[in-house]
Amino acid sequence: MKAFLIIALLIIVASTVNSSSLPKQCGENEEFDKCGTACPVDCTNYMNQPIPCTRQCVPRCACKPGFVESATGKCILPSEC
């Protein structure tokens, strides 16, 4: 019985690790970054970008270069802010 529980636990852990390492489906003008910043450039700070974050490596969809995050979370051109 112990062997069954150990095997079941290993299968659950392995499936969780595999699913979290898959690239996420990102929106328009976004790309998946498995080590993205926790402080993205957005409409409120693109002219004066924040100092480096202390919490780095956040797996997330990030705006492609040249785009910033809007208040609704979409990636837009800075001129559209």
Image (cartoon, rainbow, N blue to C red):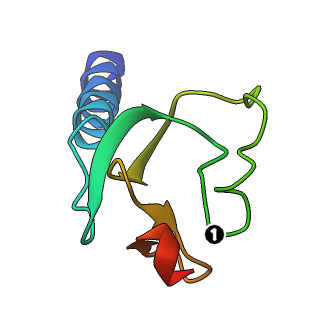
Q: Position of residue 40 (x, y in %)?
A: 59, 50
Q: Residue furthest top?
A: 3
Give the position of the N terminus as an image quadrant: top left
Residue marked by disc 1: 43
Residue at horizontal 22 percent and vertical 44 percent from the top = 23
Q: Is residue 18 left or right of residue 65?
A: left
In the depicted view, which residue is nearer to us: 43 or 54? 43
In this rendering, the answer to whether 71 lies above or below 29 is below
Among the 4 quarters of the image, the one containing residue 42: bottom right
Give the position of the C terminus as an image quadrant: bottom right
In the depicted view, which residue is nearer to us: 37 or 79? 79
Residue at horizontal 33 percent and vertical 20 percent from the top = 6
Q: Residues within 10 Å of mark 1 (few under 14, many from 20)?
A: some
Mark 1 residue element: loop
Residue at horizontal 76 percent and vertical 42 percent from the top = 50
- How many discs mark residues in the rendered view? 1
Q: Is residue 78 left or right of residue 48?
A: left
Q: Position of residue 3 (x, y in %)?
A: 28, 16
Residue at horizontal 24 percent and vertical 43 percent from the top = 19
In the depicted view, which residue is nearer to us: 3 or 47? 47
Name the kind of residue labelled 1 in the image: Cys
Among the 4 quarters of the image, the one containing residue 11: top left
Q: Position of residue 52 (x, y in %)?
A: 73, 28
